[in-house]
Amino acid sequence: MDSLTLIFVFIVSLFGFLAIGVPIAYTLVLVAVSLLVAIDNFDATLIAQSVVFGANSFTLLAIPFFILAGEIMSYGGISRRIVLFVASLVGHVRGGLGYVVIIASTIFAGLSGSAVADAAALGAILIPMMVQMGYNRALSTALICASAMIAPIIPPSIPFILYGVAGQVSIGRLFMAGIVPGLILSGSLISFWYYLSKKENFPVGKKATSAELLVALKNAIFALFMPVIIIGGIRFGVFTPTEAGCVAVIYALFISLFIYKELNFRDISHVLVSTAKTTGMVLLVAATATSAAWVVSTAGVPHAIASALSGFSDSPLMLMMVINVFLVFLGMVMDLVPAMLIFAPIFVPLVKSVGIDPVYFGVIMTLNLVIGLITPPVGTVLYVGCGVANITLGELVKKLWPLVLVELIVLLLLVVFPSITLVPLGWFIK
């Protein structure tokens, strides 16, 4: 079968089944079946074995550990303490609660690794506070959704784990490579909010006294140490990313039970059930996506796509632009987990063949697909924001698009100037 036909079968089966409402996990299995039938090599046993193999990964264990750590932090009052500490620092400037959203999201990014968890946890705390101070509800929600995009870029990052597994790339290097781009994204949102605060004359909060600031710092200090422990431990080789997830769970559990004392042993069953539900959804998609990716590779789709894009092999920048345009549209119609697990194995060999660092490409691909989480129609974080704030999707999108534009500009800068990512990576990893 020729290359164009393979690509056609792959794309039509993938987006066709999604368009008629087939759940993503089943869609991925049907994509695998379609490709095997197309190359006249269908065997149900192969698909079943590849699904089991896809879930049987030590590295993927990091995902349930970080999800569990995030649930513990939500129940244990860690998120609230971080918010109150940041509010005591910057809550008194014009538009101060907006800065609290962005800075708290940046700190929380070093704890959860999940945009959805970030938006849900901080939204529940900060949206009522912002509305009470006179901020527009939809705008407040839009800022929280946009700031939640920092979480998958700054380590620990669940999308980086998925990319590392799918593309056979060092997860430790990916974690270190995401630090500076994540901080740039945070700084860009802060700059935009500063402009908007001056333009819209946002309210000014009460300035915290030195005593209040010290109390807030004392209450948050153990929570603030958590990202230092995780990132520092990975950077200095004390533990692997998967082991870092275990450390995050133990640390969050200890401070929530014995220091903050907001989590009790009866709550642990609820935490475990919630974690099991989320983990089940993520790992089912991961397993079926791994199966689909294996069949895609066996059918020769990556080679077919590489041949179709061979005209850009002389210009890595142009190739990156083409891939990113594709990923922008992909992020609008497909959730991050399946998109990452299916297309990372396709694009990683392609970019390596033209001399693009796969770690750098992982940061770009992750940021691109993360932006898809706040673009309709399949923006997972959008629906979380609408649910938390009790607003319509239309109201949220109307206020969100300037923030999406800011993040797309950051993405473009990282594509055009790879040294923004690669040079700091050399500082963190010798």
Image: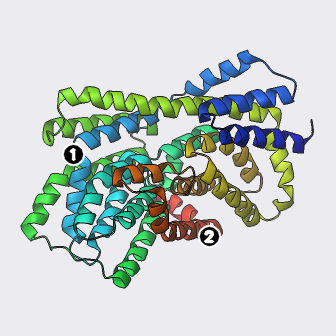
Residue drawn at the location 38% of the way across and 84% of the way down: 199
Residue drawn at the location 45% of the way across and 39% of the way down: 241
- Residue 57 located left or right of residue 91: right
In space, the residues marked 1 and 2 are separated at their CA atoms by 40 Å
Q: Which residue type does callout 1 highlight? A: Gly
Asked whether 142 or 105 is in front, the reply is 142
The image quadrant where one finds the N terminus is: top right
Residue 346 in which image quadrant? top right
Q: Is residue 123 visible?
A: yes
Q: Which mark is residue 231?
A: none
Residue drawn at the location 67% of the way across and 38% of the way down: 20
N-term-proximal mark, 1 vs 2: 1
Read off the residue under disc 2.
417
Read off the residue under disc 1.
77
Which element carries disc 1, helix, strand or loop?
loop
Colouring used for the render: rainbow
- Residue 407 located left or right of residue 140: right
Instruction: Please state the horizontal and vertical placement of residue 173, each as a whole percent of the image.
Output: 53, 49
Residue 351 against residue 134 in the figure, above or below = above
- Circle 1 residues within 10 Å: few <14, some 14–19, many ≥20: some
Instruction: Please state the horizontal and vertical placement of residue 193, each as a whole percent of the image.
Output: 39, 74
Residue 133 in which image quadrant? bottom left
